[in-house]
């Protein structure tokens, strides 16, 4: 008869943490793996992982990154957390990882009361992610203009960039405690 502990002992743990410079290359690779994100230079991910670590998160499982979140607090509006990119490896999607990374970063900054992101209209998963965040934090979700398609280059007459309407969520309902590290199973 199988031991009841065997399944628990072999259960994979996903650890959320702030990144450091040595995560930048894996974050860059994850953006490419995620598929729908605009890939930026590897340098930029190293810089974000180092200089913006307190507003970024990575999810690590079995020694590899399966999720990453980048964002910052705009100097002119530090009560807002602006999400820049969030990506989860296809092998780890649908487990709530992206939502947990958002919660993790916001929990580190009790003075943050709003979250903003721009979301392409075709990105249903992203829409659902931010709607879920608003529900969990008991906060209203407002839509704004964001960045129109005309702002983006169209190299060689290629496919135009989708518009990036703004989502603004907040103010958050309740005070949050700081949880710098969390293990998920
Ligand atoms: C968007 C993304 C980060 C979501 O990651 P995830 O860890 O699978 O998301 P979660 O498991 O936390 O799910 C969040 C919500 O989205 C919903 N969802 C997930 N995938 C979905 C899909 N393909 N279509 C519609 N809804 C979806 C979930 O049901 C959940 O909704 P709920 O809170 O009402 O239950 C992931 O799909 C991804 O990496 N996509 C490619 C990159 C991208 O487009 N990033 C966003 C733009 S910056």
Image: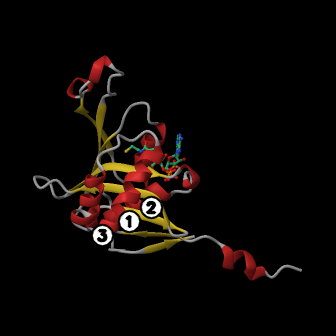
Q: Quadrant of residue 22?
A: bottom left
Q: Which residue is painted at 74% across and 79% down in the image?
A: 6
Q: Which residue is painted at 30% across and 45% down in the image?
A: 40
The C terminus: image quadrant = bottom right
Report if the CB atoms under discs 2 and 1 are less than 8 Å apart: yes
Say few, some or many: other residues with alpha carbon within 10 Å of mark 1 (under 14 / 14 to 19 / 20 or more).
many
Q: How many marks?
A: 3
Tell me, for residue 100, which label it has, or none: 2
Outermost residue on the right side: it is: 1
Left/right placement of residue 64 relative to residue 180 reads right
Q: Position of residue 78 (x, y in %)?
A: 16, 58
- In the foreground, 79 or 1: 1
Q: Which residue is mark 3?
A: 108
Q: Is residue 176 visible?
A: yes
Q: Quick one: label 2 or label 3, which is nearer the N terminus? A: 2
Report if the CB atoms under discs 3 and 1 are less than 8 Å apart: yes
Tell me, for residue 104, which label it has, or none: 1
Give the alpha-carbon distance from disc 2 to disc 3, as whole Å.
12 Å
- In the foreground, 160 or 181: 160
Q: Which residue is painted at 81% across and 82% down in the image?
A: 3
The colour scheme applied to this rendered structure is: secondary structure
The N terminus: image quadrant = bottom right
Please tell me whether residue 161 is drawn above or below residue 183 in the rendered image.
Answer: above
- In the foreground, 23 or 165: 23
């Amino acid at each position: 008869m199988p031991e009841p502990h065997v399944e628990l002992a072999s259960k994979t743990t996903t650890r959320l943490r702030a990144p450091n410079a040595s995560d930048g290359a894996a974050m860059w690779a994850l953006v490419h793996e995620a598929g729908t994100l605009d890939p930026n230079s590897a340098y930029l991910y190293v810089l974000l992982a180092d200089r913006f670590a307190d507003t970024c998160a990575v999810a690590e499982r079995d020694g590899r990154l399966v999720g990453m979140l980048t964002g910052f607090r705009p100097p002119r509006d530090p009560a807002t957390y602006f999400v820049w990119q969030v990506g989860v490896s296809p092998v780890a999607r649908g487990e709530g990882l992206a939502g947990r990374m958002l919660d993790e970063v916001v929990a580190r900054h009790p003075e943050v009361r709003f979250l903003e992101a721009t979301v392409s209209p075709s990105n249903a998963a992203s829409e659902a992610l931010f709607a879920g965040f608003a529900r969990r934090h008991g906060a209203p979700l407002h839509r704004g203009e964001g960045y129109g398609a005309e702002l983006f280059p169209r190299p060689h007459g290629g496919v135009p960039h989708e518009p990036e309407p703004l989502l603004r969520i907040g103010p958050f309902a309740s005070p949050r405690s700081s949880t710098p590290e969390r293990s998920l199973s």
